[in-house]
Image (cartoon, helix red, strand yellow):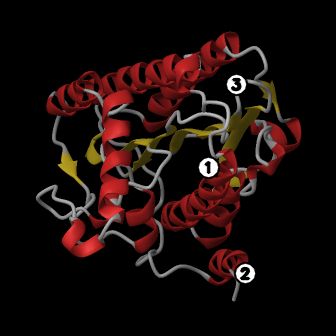
């Protein structure tokens, strides 16, 4: 089957990644509904700041859902505020997602006219545990899926001349975005969280193939007890990283130079977003069951072909 048919088959027939039926959403030491409400309030302000700084960002009402629209996940009301900026800012997709008492997520995909990283921030609450995922995702392939558990990458003896191309992509990302400032922010925040356990990352066993090809080198994937201190720290981290993304997005130095291979970036981004959808589908089906998870993954991912965003040709 084609890749699109494969994705539809996964959505309709199930996914091997969901090994057990989702458990009912429950509250732990801190109230899950209150935690998601606090995250939702913070994220609304974050998206408002983005809209204020990017004048051509516009809502997409046909792909948005209010809590009273009847869209639910395991009986919990879903809210999605979708937007994009097809003009000079070239933001392909923003999804401001909330599932009452269960999930708070911000997804930002950029268009092909810049090298600004995509941003994924997701909090899922289940049975008194907070599962947090954050990824500042590179826009060029750097062979991160081939990184081993010690952080080493295959060299030219394995990949030939491509090894230098991939190394260059990693260096470009590290210089512009994956800086010591970002690394310290992530490390310092995780270090002060209570009861953290780390979930499988790059180089570890247990990752699906789609996770391997979509995870960025600085991805944070952790679980922790649902406490007020942990919630406050995670909210603070989400706000700071989103602010960093906004700084990059409004910095003209990250726009592709005239004559840059924009079409190649578009082709890469389109396939990458398809893979991100596949990885997200596995997660949401595991969280909310097959029917609700598949619908939520499709709504949160937005259009998989971003040709509608300016500069795609």
Question: Which image quadrant is residue 251 in?
Answer: top right
Q: Position of residue 230 (x, y in %)?
A: 28, 29
- In this view, which residue lies farthest toward the top? 52
Decide: few, some or many residues near mark 1? Use Cα within 10 Å; few <14, some 14-19, many ≥20.
many
Q: Residue at x 32, y 33 (%)?
A: 178
Q: Which is closer to the viewer, label 2 or label 3?
A: 3
Circle 2/circle 3 CB separation < 8 Å: no
Q: Residue at x 26, y 24 (%)?
A: 185
Residue 195 versus residue 143 in the image, above or below:
above
Q: Position of residue 216 (x, y in %)?
A: 37, 49
Check disc 3 and report the residue beneath it: 89
Q: Mark 2: which secondary structure?
A: helix
Q: Residue at x 16, y 27 (%)?
A: 192
Q: Earlier in the sequence, mark 1 or mark 2?
A: 2
Mark identifier at residue 5: 2
Mark identifier at residue 58: none
Question: Which image quadrant is residue 260 in?
Answer: top right
Residue 99 versus residue 91 in the image, above or below:
below
Q: Of 199 and 6, which appears nearest the observer?
A: 6
Q: Position of residue 253 (x, y in %)?
A: 53, 20
| CA distance separating discs 2 and 3 | 32 Å
Q: Which is closer to the viewer, label 1 or label 2?
A: 1
Q: Earlier in the sequence, mark 3 or mark 1?
A: 3
| CA distance separating discs 1 and 2 | 23 Å
Check disc 1 and report the residue beneath it: 265
Q: Position of residue 110 (x, y in %)?
A: 62, 38
Horizontal placement of 214 versus 194: left or right?
right
């Amino acid at each position: 089957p084609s890749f699109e048919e494969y994705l539809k088959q996964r959505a309709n027939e199930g996914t091997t990644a969901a090994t057990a039926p989702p458990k009912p959403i429950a509250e732990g030491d801190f109230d899950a509904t209150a935690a998601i409400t606090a995250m939702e309030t913070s994220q609304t302000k974050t998206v408002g700041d983005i809209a204020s700084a990017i004048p051509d960002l516009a809502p997409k009402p046909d792909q948005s859902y209010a809590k009273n629209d009847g869209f639910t996940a395991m009986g919990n009301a879903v809210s999605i505020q979708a937007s994009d900026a097809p003009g000079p800012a070239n933001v392909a997709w923003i999804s401001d997602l909330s599932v009452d008492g269960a999930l708070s997520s911000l997804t930002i995909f950029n268009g092909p006219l810049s090298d600004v990283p995509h941003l994924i921030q997701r909090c899922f609450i289940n049975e008194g545990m907070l599962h947090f995922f954050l990824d500042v995702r590179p826009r060029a392939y750097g062979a991160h899926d081939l990184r081993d558990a010690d952080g080493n990458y295959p060299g030219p003896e394995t990949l030939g001349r491509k090894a230098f191309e991939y190394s260059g992509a990693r260096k470009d990302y590290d210089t512009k975005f994956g800086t010591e400032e970002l690394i310290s922010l992530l490390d310092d925040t995780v270090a002060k969280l209570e009861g953290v356990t780390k979930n499988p990352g790059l180089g570890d066993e247990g990752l699906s193939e789609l996770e391997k090809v979509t995870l960025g080198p600085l991805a944070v994937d952790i679980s922790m007890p649902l406490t007020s201190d942990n919630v406050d720290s995670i909210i603070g981290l989400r706000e700071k990283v989103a602010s960093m993304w906004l700084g990059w997005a409004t910095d003209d130095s990250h726009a592709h130079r005239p004559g840059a291979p924009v079409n190649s970036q578009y082709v890469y981004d389109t396939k990458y977003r398809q893979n991100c959808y596949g990885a997200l589908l596995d997660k949401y089906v595991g969280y909310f069951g097959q029917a609700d998870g598949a619908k939520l993954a499709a709504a949160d991912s937005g259009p998989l072909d971003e040709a509608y965003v300016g500069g795609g040709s």
